[in-house]
Image: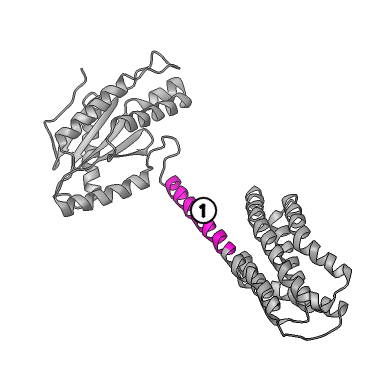
Amino acid sequence: MQNLGSKGLSLTKRLFKSRAIGSALGFLCIAVAMFPLHPPAWAWALMILNGFIWPVAAFQLARRSTFPLKTEQRNVLLDSFFCGFWVGAMQFNLLPSVTSMSMMAMNNVALGGIRFLLTGWLAQALGITVSVLVFPLAFQPETSTVQMFACVPLLAIYPLMLGWIAYKQNHLLKDHKRALLALSQTDSLSGLLNHGAWKGHLDVEFQRCALAQQGGTIALIDIDHFKVINDTYGHVVGDNVLRQLSKVLNQNLRKFDLAGRYGGDEFCVILPDTSLATAAEIMDRLRDTFNATHYEWEPMMKVSLSIGLAPYSPSHADATFWLNEADKALYVAKSTGRNRVSCRVDGALHPVLSDPV
């Protein structure tokens, strides 16, 4: 309900500008066409109300409505009705009539597609019928030079304005699409890439390494005894530890490294074009930095990391095999005392090891 209301209010604000400008330009077009017909005073008053008062009234009706979108749709149908009414009142003067109905059709299509266009045509037909009942039935399609020039502003300005609104809306939708894409790829707790997004980047990195024959290294990171932290200090503290690790990753990795939350208390990093030795140095510094973290809410708490590294190898059939190597290296780090970096190359433990001081 709130989303519908928000959507309706946004539409109302956009249509107010187009309706206000379109009605004012339409007033000029219709008034010049009506002038030779010597309409009564009430018709002039209605033209002024329709051209300058109605846009404000329509905006207020929609803005204060519980369902602004539906109210705005009714407002646009009233616009169509008025358009048909003035076409009949102008005795079907060709250019002003076609101009007014074309601009109205453009509005209806933009708002609701073909179905709303057809509904708008019915409203215009009703307006013409009422006009024929009010004014003497006549058909004078001739358009004078003055009347032709009076239509020019509506023909030139209104489509340009609608095009600008459509451009801004398209730009806004692109921004929303980018934001939604980023949101769909982001872990809500850590702010890093989520599991699926990181795996997608890993597949891309694997293909790049295979084509370029340039190595990269991946790391799997596990927070030591994280379950004990949750059980002892509570899940709020546990979540803060996860956020702290994501902060340390953001501050200590290079700009082109890709960090993500693999799941639970496991994190993952892609280090492109990075040798195993360099990756071990980076991860060891990161481990030391995280170990030194002071938690104000739990001053006595110390948290360490176990890290498994695996470099790209042509022997890997796909990215899953590469990731499996890092997972096995992480298992070694955890099973040999934790708080260390372990490395595997082509299925064997590598001598580049990091032990806690």
Q: As drawn, is 18 to the left or to the right of 56?
A: left
Type of amino acid at the residue the image marks with label 1: Leu
Q: Horizontal and vertical percent for residue 325? A: 20, 41
In the depicted structure, whether residue 110 falls above or below residue 128: above
Viewer-proximal residue among 261 and 106: 106
Q: Which region of the structure is painted magenta? A: 161-184
Locate residue 300, reporting x and y percent: 38, 13
Q: Is residue 286 above or below residue 9?
A: above
Q: Which residue is mark 1?
A: 172
Q: Is residue 14 left or right of residue 187?
A: right
For the point 43% across and 20% down, the residue is 232
Picture quadrant where residue 132 is located: bottom right
From the image, give the main secondary structure of the stretch colored magenta.
helix
As displayed, is residue 195 above or below residue 210?
Answer: above
Residue 69 location, x and y as percent? 68, 57
Q: Is residue 110 above or below residue 69?
A: below
Q: Position of residue 197 (x, y in %)?
A: 36, 47
